[in-house]
Structure formats: structure tokens, C-alpha cells
Amino acid sequence: MELFDLSLLNSTLRMVTPILLAALGGMLCARVGIFNVGLEGLILVGAFSAIVANYFTGNLWFSIFFAALMSMLFSLILAVMTIQFKANMIVVGIAINFLALGLTTFLLRTIFEVKGAFYDNTMSGLSNIHIPFVQDIPVLGTIFSGHTVLVYVALIVPFILFIFMYRTVTGFRMISVGYNQVAAHSLGIRVKGLQYLAVAMSGVLCGLAGAQLSLGLVTMFSEGMTAGRGFIALVATMLGQSHPFGVLGASLLFGLTDALSTRMQSFSIPTQFTSMIPYILTLVAMFLLKGRGVEMNHSNQQSSR
């Protein structure tokens, strides 16, 4: 087995999906002046909700919908605390992460009466879709064919968000809120409404990320199975400067390192070292971001008048 080949790129698309979807959710929040540190918790809620719905209904489409719904409702906690009560975004985000970790652990033991992880061989995960005609193309077929529906959704969403943000009135208003809330409010823009919308959309995307994690990559749930993907998504949001295509590129970079770390395990390299690769890249990216002075929270720079 070679270290770099087309199958590595195929694995990259699978690995990048949870990170990309969550990073796009973080991007929406950043565009309205909210620094969403709770992405990790929102993904975890989505992953657990997808497994619960799949176990009790056996319907994969409903499981995806339920995961998106639960993460969206959970994200409203962040919205109410930061938008309505003006709580510190960082503190609330960290609280969301711990709340999600504790709640999913508690419900795992309450609903399924197990500790650590839940797996049922009667459950079926998301099936791979082989795209007609594309699968027969030598290079493209190997890379892009044979993925779950959420992988293709993740690749399409950046283009949809680009059109939404830069070609629609609502999108322009969201961007204006992120630049200056006071000026946007003086123009009659409903600042709080757009912020709630952005956080809710972020919750939906994180729910889809969680569904891919627990139904696409594996068909099980384990405590803390996000393994820092939410924080990596947050860095991808910053590295991509809150632009849909920038976030796509940054996420693909992190997805590639994730797939590469998994591939390197087959070369008798200790798992402890290969698992470090995505997080080392995250730290390097954060240092680069600090050097460039990237600012995410534009709306906090309100002028006191």
C-alpha cells in the first residue's frame, strides 16, 4: 500500500465531512458576530441523536432529520445566552461542550443501559452512493464516487452558502451585522433575528456533521466520539477567514491530515504518533492565525456612544 494514492483522497472526503459541516456552521455564526466555541458539543448531540433515532425507528432519513433538529434546539441555548442575556461567548460555548458531553453520557446509560459505547448489529448505517457515469471515470470515479449522501451535501453546501451570503439580501444583512451591529441596527436591520437564524443554521449543520460521524463513518456512538473535531472545525473557520470557499479549503487540509494519520497506522507507525498529526496541524494553524492577526468577532468592536 502506498502512502499517497487516489484512495487517500477518497478517504479525505469521508474524514472531512464532519469538520467541513461544523466549520461552515461556525462561519455563519462568525458572520453575525458570534464566536461559536460550542461546535464540539453540537456535533456530539447530533451524533447521539442520530443513533437514538436510528435505533428506535430504523429510518435513516428520519435519523438525519432528528440529529439536525436536536442540534438546532441545543444551539438555541447558546443563542439565548449570548444574544438575549449578553453572556460571554467563550464561557457559554465551553459550557455547551461540557453539557453535551455529560448529557450524552447520562442518556447513553439511561436509554441503552451501557457505558462507554453503544453498538447494535441490527442497525444499518448510511450506504455509499455510486454516481452513474462518474464512477466509470478513472480518477474522478475513485475519488468522488462511493460516499454517503452527507459527503455530497457537505461538498455542495459551501456553494449554496456563497450564493446565500453574497447574492441575497438576507446574506448581505448578515454580513453587515458581523461588521457593525450598531450601524446595521440603525438601518432597520433586525440584528437579533439574523443572529438567531445564523446560530440555528449552525446547529443544523453540526447535527448533519454528527450524523455523518455516527452513521456514516461508523454505525455506533461512543462517549466523546467527536474527539476534538469541533475545535478543529473552529480553527478551519478562522483559517478560511469565514468565507465559504476558504473554509472548504482549510477543512480539506485538516481532512487530508486525518486520513493520512489513519493511513500511516498501516505502516507500523505507533498510533500515538499518527493520531497527533491533525492536532499538530491545528496548533500550527493557530500560530499562523495569530501572526496574521485574524479577527473573528467583528461585532464585539462596538463603539461606545
Image: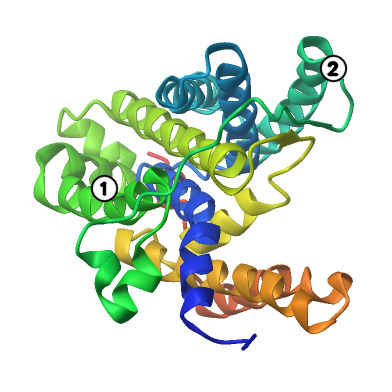
Mark 2 or mark 1: whose residue is earlier in sequence: 2
Query: Disc 2 residue type?
Result: Arg
Q: Residue drawn 56% across and 87% down?
A: 4
Q: Quadrant of residue 213?
A: top right
Q: Are marks 2 and 1 in contact (CB under 8 Å)?
A: no
Residue found 43% across the figure and 37% down from its top = 202
Q: Is residue 71 above or below residue 111?
A: below
Per the model, the C-alpha gap separating discs 2 and 1 is 43 Å
Single out the mark in the foreground, 2 or 1.
2
Give the image location of residue 48, x and y in percent: 65, 27
- The residue wearing badge 2 is 109
Of 249 and 123, the residue lying toward us: 123
Residue 156 seen in the figure? yes
Q: Position of residue 227 (x, y in %)?
A: 73, 50
Quarter of the view holding residue 187: top left
User: Which residue does the numbered mark 1 point to in the structure image?
Assistant: 175
Say which element carries label 1: helix
**Dot 2: within a 10 Å radius of its alpha carbon, few (fewer than 14), some, or many (20 or more) residues?**
some
Is the residue 7 above or below the residue 303 in the image?
Answer: below
Q: Label 1 sits on what residue type?
A: Ile
Establish if 114 lies above or below 221.
Answer: above
81 or 220, nearer to the observer: 220
Is 100 situated left or right of 157 in this image? right
Relative depth, front residue between 293 and 264:
264
Question: Which x, y percent locates residue 49?
Answer: 59, 23
Badge 2 element: helix
Counting other residues with Cα less than 10 Å from the Cα at mark 1, is it few (<14), some (14-19), or many (20 or more)?
A: many
